[in-house]
């Protein structure tokens, strides 16, 4: 679509022009097409950008995986369902603490046996 | 001189007497309208867009007080029909001087800067198809434009809109106040007040206008569609987006460059991470200051002498038509995408393409949840919503390109 051609055609118009209905229809259809075309162009650009970033992200992830995989063998995970270290509970009962730890594990995607909780403290009610 | 003559002279020079001579009743009606608007904006039961309606309503009140000269233009800065010889710019009324910010497009552009700084284009970047919904929801602009032109033919020219006036009226369908003001100030300055009032009034009434249209055009099954969670968008994508969009739009439609340019500059302030102070100013202080000046002076253009006419009523009706068709355009393309994607897109998000950020997206969310309580459409609807802002700016740019010579 050549926007300059539209602009050239529009040089005959000014704000006080009284348009005939066929002319108005032409302007309307062209206007809607221009908006569609322009936003579709931006959509194509976004898709292209997303693809580039996806490829770049994949190669970066692969690099990170290689460096992370090495120390993996050094530590030994605890038995399933256990967490490491000593946990201080301040004004929190054990079932509540268990629920909190399970939620943290679920949301972070890290198994419970690889997490180390130090303390769970109830904040003052405001 | 008798005391009666003194009182007669005082009465004749008072503003009160002006309300009861010639067209003074028109000012009186506008004063009542202003008081009703203030009531609707302030009363806890209504609170219709108070941040805009209070300055607009008070502007109407200011401009319709007879003999105050707040919008007088003896220097002929904007109106050369009543120039007083030897008058300087500072002799103009205070509201007229501030109005120069509207006339010169400074205020609409600064408002767009603030909107850009408040907008998160993440949902749009995560789902680029939203842009098509934002484009389809500009349908009402062109339908209202067509109807406005046809009115002149139907009435045999008794009431006719010129091309510029019809274009400015159509832009109401973009549901974007600053864009409507900018277009009207360039193409139909004499209709600025009714166009701005219609645009802002209908934006406030979106929760009432859109739902019946959305329900009418969609099936229960379509309204219940749950959409997939959006992907995460990287910071770099968010930084590149405003720069490239501005370049694309400005190169293709230079007349849209001012609005889109300021919108994207504001967004770049927000996303680049090194201009937090500028972003904060654009979002808060600057937007608030400009809103006060824009709202008050737009209201002040609603002088009873010019405002009360048949065209005003037609503009109000055409504005509603424009809003309705824009909503329908977005929903209908949403339906088409629902079919193409095999039911992955909920057509209700299409109605959010009518700018009016974030109210239109909220309507999609509320309507979606009515039919499926597990549905969460807000973020999906924000995509077409912000696309609508770009779409209406492009549509306005196109109209300016066509008629602003």
Image: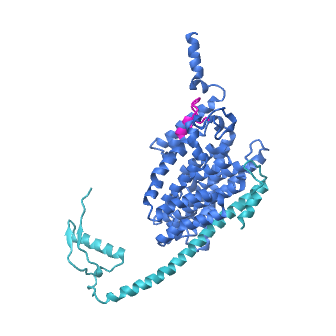
Chain colours: A cyan, B blue
**B38 relative position to A109: left or right:** right
Residue B286 image offset from top left, x and y in percent: 48, 51
Where does residue B260 sit, x and y in percent of width and height? 58, 59
Judge left or right: residue A59 versus residue B89.
left
Q: Could you tell whether B217 is left or right of A24 in the image?
A: left
Q: Horizontally, is B323 left or right of B118 in the view?
A: right
The reply to whether residue A23 is visible in this rendering is: yes
Residue B83: quadrant of the picture: top right
Above or below, B336 against B74 in this view is below
- Residue at 78% across, 54% down: A12
If the image is split into quadrants, where does the C terminus of chain A sit?
bottom left
Residue B71 in picture, x, y percent from top left: 59, 36
How many labels, in total?
0
Q: Is residue A103 magenta?
A: no
Q: Is residue B338 visible?
A: no
Could you say where residue B172 lies in the image, as x and y percent from the top left?
62, 51
A72 and B75: which is toward the camera: B75
Q: In the rendered structure, which segment of residues is drawn in magenta?
A: B57-72
Q: Extreme front residue here?
A: B86
Asked whether B255 or B196 is in front, the reply is B255
Indicate whether B160 appears above or below B367.
above
In which quarter of the view is residue A122 placed? bottom left
Say which quadrant the N terminus of chain A sits in.
bottom right
List the single residue furthest toward the top. Answer: B2
Foreground pick, A48 / B250: B250
- Kindly identify the residue that appears in the image at 57 percent across and 40 percent down: B97
């Amino acid at each position: 679509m050549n926007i300059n051609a539209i602009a050239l055609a529009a040089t005959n118009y000014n704000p006080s022009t009284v348009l005939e209905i066929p002319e108005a229809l032409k302007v309307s259809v062209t206007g809607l097409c221009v908006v569609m075309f322009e936003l579709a162009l931006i959509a194509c650009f976004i898709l292209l950008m997303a693809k580039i970033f996806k490829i770049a992200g994949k190669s970066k992830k692969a690099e990170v995986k290689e460096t992370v995989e090495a120390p993996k063998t050094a530590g030994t995970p605890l038995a399933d369902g256990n967490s490491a270290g000593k946990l201080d509970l301040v004004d929190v009962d054990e079932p509540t603490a268990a629920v909190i730890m399970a939620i943290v594990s679920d949301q972070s995607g890290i198994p419970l046996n690889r997490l180390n909780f130090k303390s769970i403290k109830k904040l003052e009610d405001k | 001189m008798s005391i009666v003559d003194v009182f007669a002279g005082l009465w004749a020079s008072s503003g009160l007497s002006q309300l009861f001579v010639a067209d003074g009743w028109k000012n009186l009606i506008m004063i009542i309208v202003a008081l009703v608007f203030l009531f609707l904006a302030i009363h806890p039961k209504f609170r219709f867009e108070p941040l805009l309606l209070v300055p607009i309503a008070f502007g109407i009140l200011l401009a319709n007080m007879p003999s105050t000269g707040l919008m007088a233009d003896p220097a002929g800065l904007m109106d050369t029909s009543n120039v007083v010889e030897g008058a300087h710019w500072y002799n103009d009324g205070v509201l007229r001087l501030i109005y120069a910010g509207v006339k010169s497009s400074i205020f609409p552009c600064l408002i767009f800067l603030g909107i850009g700084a408040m907008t998160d284009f993440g949902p749009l970047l995560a789902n680029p198809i939203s842009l098509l919904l934002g484009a389809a929801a500009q349908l009402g602009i062109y339908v209202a434009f067509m109807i406005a032109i046809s009115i002149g033919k139907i009435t045999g020219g008794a009431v006719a809109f010129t091309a510029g006036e019809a274009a400015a009226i159509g832009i109401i369908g973009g549901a974007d106040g600053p864009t409507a003001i900018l277009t009207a100030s360039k193409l139909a300055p004499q209709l600025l007040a009714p166009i701005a009032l219609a645009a802002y009034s209908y934006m406030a009434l979106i929760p009432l206008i859109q739902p019946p249209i959305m329900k009418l055009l969609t099936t229960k099954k379509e309204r219940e569609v749950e959409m997939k969670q959006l992907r995460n968008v990287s910071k770099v994508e968010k930084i590149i987006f405003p720069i490239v969009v501005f370049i694309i739009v400005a190169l293709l439609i230079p007349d849209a460059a001012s609005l889109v340019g300021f919108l994207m500059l504001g967004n770049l302030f927000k996303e680049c991470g090194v201009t937090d102070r500028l972003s904060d100013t654009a979002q808060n202080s600057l937007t608030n200051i400009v809103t006060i000046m824009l709202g008050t002076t737009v209201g002040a253009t609603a002088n009873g002498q010019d405002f009360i006419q048949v065209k005003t009523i037609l503009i109000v009706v055409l504005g509603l038509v424009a809003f309705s068709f824009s909503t329908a355009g977005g929903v209908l393309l949403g339906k088409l995408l629902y079919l193409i994607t095999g039911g992955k897109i909920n057509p209700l998000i299409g109605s959010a393409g009518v700018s009016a950020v974030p109210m239109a997206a909220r309507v999609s969310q509320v309507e979606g949840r009515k039919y499926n309580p597990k549905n969460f459409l807000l973020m999906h609807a924000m995509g077409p919503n912000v696309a609508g802002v770009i779409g209406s700016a492009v549509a306005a740019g196109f109209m300016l390109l066509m008629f602003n010579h």
